[in-house]
Image (tube, rainbow, N blue to C red):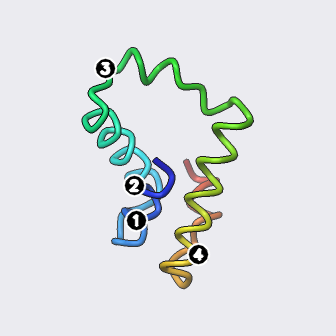
Amino acid sequence: MGRESAALYCQGNDLKAAIEKSVIKTMLDQDLDPESMDQIDLDQKEIGIAFFENVFADAFANCPSRARQIWRQMTEM
């Protein structure tokens, strides 16, 4: 989901919309219901860190000028 979020962010979506769209896409691609997604706890250190590492790494690699705004958008979420 992190890489998908970064790709959507680089296409011009704001960070929150990019994350929401990637979650929905993951649910559809993996045939997950909302209850299954509720069981994924992004507060778990391993999952949360990996997710945001992928978002940041891909955004800074693929759209560095836009990625400079990512910290501000994150605090606004």
Q: Residues within 10 Å of mark 2 (few under 14, many from 20)?
A: many
Say left or right for 44 vs 60.
right
The tag earlier along the polypeptide, 4 or 1, is: 1
Question: Residue drawn 56% across and 78% down?
Answer: 61
Q: CA distance from mark 4 to mark 1?
A: 11 Å
Q: Looking at the image, is 20 positioned above or below residue 13?
A: above
The tag earlier along the polypeptide, 1 or 2, is: 1
Question: Residue drawn 60% across and 55% down?
Answer: 74
Q: Which residue is mark 3?
A: 33
Secondary structure, mark 1, is helix
Query: What residue occupies the far top of the structure in this picture?
Result: 35
Question: Residue drawn 51% across and 18% down?
Answer: 39
Q: CA distance from mark 4 to mark 3?
A: 32 Å
The tag earlier along the polypeptide, 4 or 3, is: 3
Q: Which residue is mark 1?
A: 7
Question: Residue drawn 41% across and 56% down?
Answer: 4
Query: What residue occupies the far right of the structure in this picture?
Result: 45
Q: Residues within 10 Å of mark 1 (few under 14, many from 20)?
A: many
Circle 1/circle 2 CB separation < 8 Å: yes
Q: Residues within 10 Å of mark 3 (few under 14, many from 20)?
A: few
**Circle number at residue 60:** 4
Q: Position of residue 3 (x, y in %)?
A: 47, 58
The tag earlier along the polypeptide, 3 or 1, is: 1
Secondary structure, mark 2, is helix
Amino acid type shown at disc 4: Phe
Q: Position of residue 43 (x, y in %)?
A: 67, 31
Q: Residues within 10 Å of mark 4 (few under 14, many from 20)?
A: some
Q: Position of residue 26 (x, y in %)?
A: 35, 39
